[in-house]
Image (cartoon, rainbow, N blue to C red):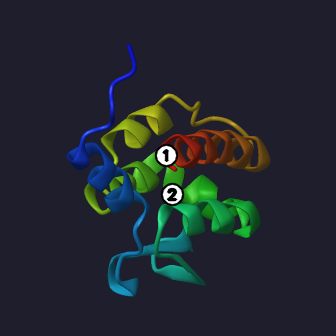
Amino acid sequence: MYEKESQSETSNRKSILRNVPFETGFHFNIEQGIYTGITAVSLPEFALKLQTVDANSILFHYPRGDFQRWVQETLGDEELANRMCFIQANLSGEKLRNQLLKVVQKRISELK
C-alpha cells in the first residue's frame, strides 16, 4: 500500500537540499590552511564542485571525514554521511572522486 510522505519528511528533504550561508559552506582545501577558492553551499553544488575540484583536495578531505562531517552536521543528512563512510579511503584521486560522486548524486536523486 502506498503511503503519502509526511510533511516532516518533505520538510527534511528540502532542508538537506537547501543553500547554507557561505560561512558554513564546504570550503575545499588541498592541505591544512591552503584554500582552493572553491566553496559549495548546497548538496547539489557540492556534487558539481566535486566534479572539477583538484583531486588532491578530495584526497585531503575524505580520509579526515570532512565531507561526511559537513553533510551530517551542516546539511543534516545522516544517511548520506553514513553511505560516504563505506567508500574505500585508499582509492586514487579520480576513483575516489567517482565513487563520491556516485553516492552523492544518487542521494540527491532520492531527495528530489
Q: What residue is drawn where x is 32% and y is 61%?
A: 15
13 vs 75: above or below:
above
Q: What residue is drawn where x is 58% and y is 45%?
A: 109
* Of 56 and 94, the residue lying toward us: 94
Query: Which residue is under mark 2?
Result: 61
Residue 87 position within the rendered picture, expressed as x and y whole percent measured from the top left: 56, 32
Quadrant in which residue 49 is drawn: bottom right
65 vs 87: above or below:
below
Q: In the figure, is residue 13 to the left or right of 97?
A: left
Q: Mark 2 belongs to which amino acid? A: His
> Are the two marked residues, 1 and 2, in contact with CB atoms closer than 8 angstroms?
yes
Q: In the figure, is residue 76 to the left or right of 102?
A: left
In the rendered image, the residue lying farthest to the top is 1
Whether residue 90 is visible? yes
Q: In the figure, is residue 61 to the left or right of 91?
A: left
Q: What residue is drawn where x is 69% and y is 37%?
A: 91
Quarter that holds the N terminus: top left
Residue 98 position within the rendered picture, expressed as x and y whole percent measured from the top left: 73, 44
Estimate the spatial distance between the alpha carbons at disc 1 and disc 2, rounded to whole Å.
Answer: 6 Å
Residue 76 position within the rendered picture, expressed as x and y whole percent measured from the top left: 28, 53
Query: Which residue is under mark 1?
Result: 63
Q: What residue is drawn where x is 57% and y is 36%?
A: 89
Q: Residues within 10 Å of mark 1 (few under 14, many from 20)?
A: some
Q: Mark 1 belongs to which amino acid? A: Pro
Whether residue 76 is visible? no
Under tag 1, what secondary structure?
Answer: helix
